[in-house]
Amino acid sequence: MASRVDGANTLGPWGGSGGTAWSFENAQTITKIKISVGDVVDSITFQYMDGETARWSPRYGGAGGKPTEIELGPAEFIISIKGYYGTYAGKTIIYSLTFVTTNREYGPYGREQGTQFSVPKGTGWIIGFHGRSGTLLDAIGVYKKTCVEPAVVVGPWGGSGGTAWSFDNALTITKIKISVGDVVDSITFQYTDGETTRWSPRFGGAGGNPKEIDLGTNNNLKAISGYYGNYHGIIVIRSLTFETTTGTYGPYGQEEGTAFSLPLKAGKVVGFFGHAGQWLDALGFYLKHASA
C-alpha cells in the first residue's frame, strides 16, 4: 500500500482504467454524498465543510443517472466502502457502491453484479477518495488512516441539548476562538491542513463576544477547565480556561455552576467533541498518552 495522503494508506482503485484520474482529500469533513445511478454508477460528488462554508467537489463521472443524496451527521465518519465492478458497454466500470459509517450503512446504490470489492473496517477511518471517471465512474479507491492507538474519550461535561459535534484536528490547532456572553456561546478552531490554514465549523450559536487565543505552531495544551450549569432551563458550558506551555487563557465566561478540569500531565488532546445549538451545551476530549 503506497501512501498518497500524509499518514494514510492508499487502497484501490477498484474498477477500470478508462477516463481520467481524480482525487478528493476532504473526506473527514464530508456532510453529503451525491451518487447518480442508472444501469451503473454514473457519478459521485461530495459536499464538505471549508471552515464554516459548505462546498461541493467536482462531479466525478458523467451527467447521467438518477441522483441520490446521503446526508451525514455532524459526528458521523466513513469507515468503509464496498461495491461491485464489471464490464459495461465494453469498459470496466463501477456497478454498485455502499458506504459504511460510524452510524450505519448507506446503499447499495446500483446493481450488485460483477466482481465484489470492499475496504476492511478494522481500526481507522477514510480520509479521502480517488479513482477514474469519464462519462461514468470507472474506478474508485480510498485513502485510509489507521489508528495505531485508540483515543481515550473523556467527558463530555455539560448538557445533552443541541446536536452532537466532533473535531479531530486538535494536534494542529493554531488558534481557538471562543464567543462568550452570559455563557459560552460557541467555540471554533483554526488548524493547519498541510501548509493551508483553515477554520473548523462554529460549534454553537452566533451570539457572544469573540475572544481569540493564538497558540502558535508549538503551543501544547497543558490543562483545560471550566464550569457548566443551568441557563434558561438547559445545562450549558458557562466558562472555559485553557492552560498552555506559555501561559493561561481565561477564564472566558462566568465561573458559576459545577466545576470540571482536565489535567494533561500524562497525555495530550487529539480531539474535541460535544453538543451545541444556540450555545455550547457540552464539551469533551479525545486523549492519547504523551508517548503516542
Image (cartoon, grey):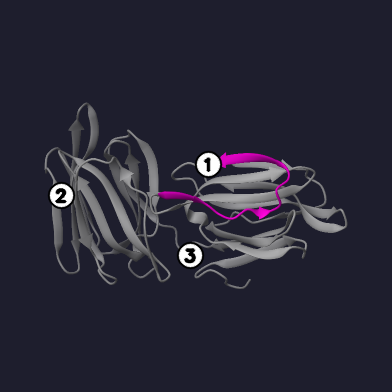
- Spatial CA span between label 2 and label 1: 34 Å
Q: Are marks 3 and 2 in contact (CB under 8 Å)?
A: no
Badge 3 element: loop
Q: Amino acid at mark 2?
A: Tyr
**Residue under label 1:** 103
Q: Main SS of the magenta segment?
A: strand
Instruction: Please state the extent of the stretch shown in magenta in the rendering.
Output: 53-71
**Residue under label 2:** 252
Q: Which mark is residue 148?
A: 3
Task: Give the residue drawn at x 34%, y 40%.
Answer: 275
Quadrant the N terminus occupies = bottom right
The number of numbered badges drawn on the structure is 3
Q: Is residue 162 left or right of residue 101?
A: left
- Spatial CA span between label 3 and label 2: 35 Å
User: Can residue 204 be seen in the rendering of this structure?
Assistant: yes
275 magenta-colored? no
Residue count near mark 2 (Cα–Cα under 10 Å), binned few <14, some 14–19, many ≥20: many
Say which label, 3 or 2, has the lower sequence index. Answer: 3
Task: Give the residue drawn at x 22%, y 47%.
Answer: 179
Q: Quadrant of residue 20?
A: bottom right
Quadrant the C terminus occupies = bottom left
Badge 1 element: loop
Residue ranking furthest to the front:
63
Q: Is residue 155 left or right of residue 19?
A: left
Say which label, 2 or 1, has the lower sequence index. Answer: 1
Give the camera-side residue of 72 and 246.
72
